[in-house]
Image (tube, grey):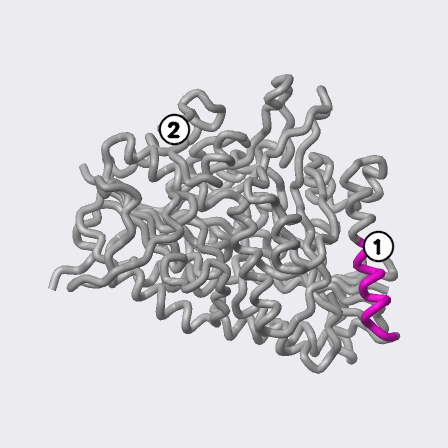
Amino acid sequence: ERSNLAGVRHILLVLSGKGGVGKSTVCTELALSLRRSGKKVGILDVDLCGPSIPRMFRVQDNDVHQCDSGWVPVFVDQEKSIALMSIGFLLEKPDDAVVWRGPKKNALIKQFVADVAWGELDFLIVDTPPGTSDEHISTVEALRPYKPLGAILVTTPQAVAVGDVRRELTFCKKTGLRVLGIVENMSGFVCPHCSECTNIFSKGGGEELAKHAGVPFLGSVPLDLQLSRSLEEGGDFIQEFPKSSAFPALTHIAQQILAAASQRSS
Amino acid sequence: QVALLDIDICGPSIPKMMGLEGEQVHQSGSGWSPVYVEENLGVMSVGFLLSSPDDAVIWRGPKKNGLIKQFLRDVDWGEVDYLIVDTPPGTSDEHLSIVQYLSASHVAGAVIVTTPQEVSLQDVRKEINFCHKVKLPIIGVVENMSGFVCPKCKKESQIFPPTTGGAEKMCQNLNVSLLGKVPLDPQIGKSCDKGQSFLSEAPESPATSSYRNIIQRIQEYCDLHCSQEEKII
């Protein structure tokens, strides 16, 4: 019987040691950029306690249906250009807390990896919660037979965040997960009134970490009011705001992922 | 006399923020000694048990629970007025365990931190739900990163926009207290990175007065709801 992941060409994970740095944002914008490049993309959201992906695509009220091969992912549009799976779709009420210990989380993650009928995808992006625990161990174990392309690590510039992301790098090394690179998010804010740039969360920590660890630096993404709004509304930032400050960095990240995938295929 | 217990096992940030990176935990006859920032501020974190900043704690739930139990049982805190517990994001092992292990003590309550945007609030509503489920009182909610005032032109930007009314609306809807709003200030991150006290470094910052007001409200809550015993937050 054909595995549900057999039609997925490249799998990549988005990780961070730290919470609130923008993993879900990077997943969302990467998916939108890859779609713009003509790719078919899926996002698997394994953040079971804080699933952010459905709202970022304005499909938070959708339900999940079953088919012969398992669960049908939620498509963000008629063209089925982006497919999503998240525990967010399985909750009866959006405010319901998923208060599960490790073993129950692991069981659902195994199901998410094996039982979603993704069909043919160019990229499957896996959004994770912060940390190096059950969700991460289980996801990497379940995905191992499918040889993921690698992991993108997201940090903010300051040392407190970088300190946790260093541990995430160790996690990747220990589990044999290739590091595609580090993204430094929330890297500077340009005041819309006077154009003064302020490094609210410091600057450069992500780039330094990449250099120190010998992994690619994928770029710095600035704080961007239009990006924040777009995520709130579940809009398509890449389509609607090509002149916005975060656009170049986000599309550059997608370009580098496309290059890595292309290299792997050849 | 304050004790700060960091149970974020995978991402222990407290040692760095307290200027205690590289410190180790000492054992004595009475158990593990906390690491002291000052005479009246002791800290415990898995960070002190790791030998390198690259060391990752790649543990499943049960092992994390075991360490949390040890932290509560084996650390010789002495007489303490306030025990503050820092937790990782989520509603899972660490959260269930800390509530369970502290059930014999009187926990004053939880302070829940959010940022203004709905992406954050939607998770925080779950955290509030968690507190109700495990009968943990909620002292209140703090709205962090609440607006940014440009140091040059002094105009405000809502970097994390409260598109659904922010913490204020959520607190009204869920009948919990809003303890206060803390604005973004680059000095906060800088102080934390250097392991210095932001409140001492930037006494004039609007964020400092926000923090102080919030802390006062927490103390008032504790004075009202807890007796002479140790207050656990």
Residue A204 visible in this rendered orientation of the protein: yes
Toward which corner of the image does residue B157 lie, by quadrant? Answer: top right
Image point 78% across, 74% down: which residue? B76
Image point 81% across, 63% down: which residue? B221
Return the residue nearer the eye: A171 or A47: A47
Q: Amino acid at mark 1?
A: Gln
Q: Which residues are magenta?
A: B215-227
Q: Residue pushed farthest front?
A: B173
In magenta segment, residue A177:
no
Within 10 Å of disc 2 (Cα), the crowding (few <14, some 14-19, many 20+) is some
Residue B63, image x, y percentages? 52, 73
In magenta segment, residue B219:
yes
Q: Which residue is mark 1?
A: B216
Toward which corner of the image does residue B43 lie, by quadrant? Answer: bottom right
Q: Which residue is mark 2?
A: A252
Within 10 Å of disc 1 (Cα), the crowding (few <14, some 14-19, many 20+) is few
- Label 2 chain ID: A
